[in-house]
Amino acid sequence: MSGITDLETLLASLDPVLCPARYAFRSCGKEEASALMAADGNDEEPFAFIREEEGWTVILPLGENHPAAEADSASAAAMKRITLNVHSSLEAVGLTAHVSRVLAGRNISANVVAGFYHDHIFVPEDRAEEALAALTT
């Protein structure tokens, strides 16, 4: 199933949803990333793994069941995830730019992670409702 490529259609169909979980971005080595990948199936499993030259970035839910998310190499601020429920194509042009422009216009930082079906925007927890409202209008 291919996603939508037309920017007008994408913007009219964004359907942004705020996830209730809190997240942290964490940098770790290959061994720790592998251990986190193996801890699959629990409620606190990582949202995403990104391999970079410097090591692995892991996006972890914050909470008692995932103390690794609270460690020193986690991002300083808790983040919230907004999922754009429109099925955007990986070949679509302009969606990320539009979302970034809307949030930047309100001085809200945004970290975008694209999946095959949806785009996920991580924003500071204390600005999440404002970011959601901005993307909804």
Image: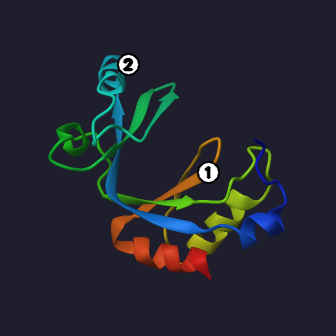
Residue 56 screen position, x and y as percent: 42, 29
Looking at the image, residue 42 sits to the left or right of residue 117; the answer is: left
Q: Which residue is mark 1?
A: 118
Residue at 70% x, 68% y is 13
Question: Does dot 2 land on a helix, a strand or a loop?
Answer: helix
Q: Earlier in the sequence, mark 1 or mark 2?
A: 2
Q: Amino acid at mark 1?
A: His
Question: Does dot 1 land on a helix, a strand or a loop?
Answer: loop
**Residue at the extreme right of the image, as rendered:** 6
Please tell me the numbered disc located at residue 101.
none
Which quarter of the figure is the C terminus placed in?
bottom right
Residue 107 visible? The answer is no
> Does 42 appear above or below 10?
above
Looking at the image, residue 116 sits to the left or right of residue 7; the answer is: left
Residue at 56% x, 67% y is 16
> Does 20 appear above or below 39?
below
Quadrant in the picture for residue 70 = top left
Residue 134 visible? The answer is yes
Looking at the image, residue 7 sits to the left or right of residue 96; the answer is: right
**Residue at the extreme top of the image, as rendered:** 31
Q: Which residue is mark 2?
A: 30
Foreground of the two, 69 or 64: 64
Categorize mark 1 by other alpha carbons within 10 Å: few (<14), some (14-19), many (20+): some
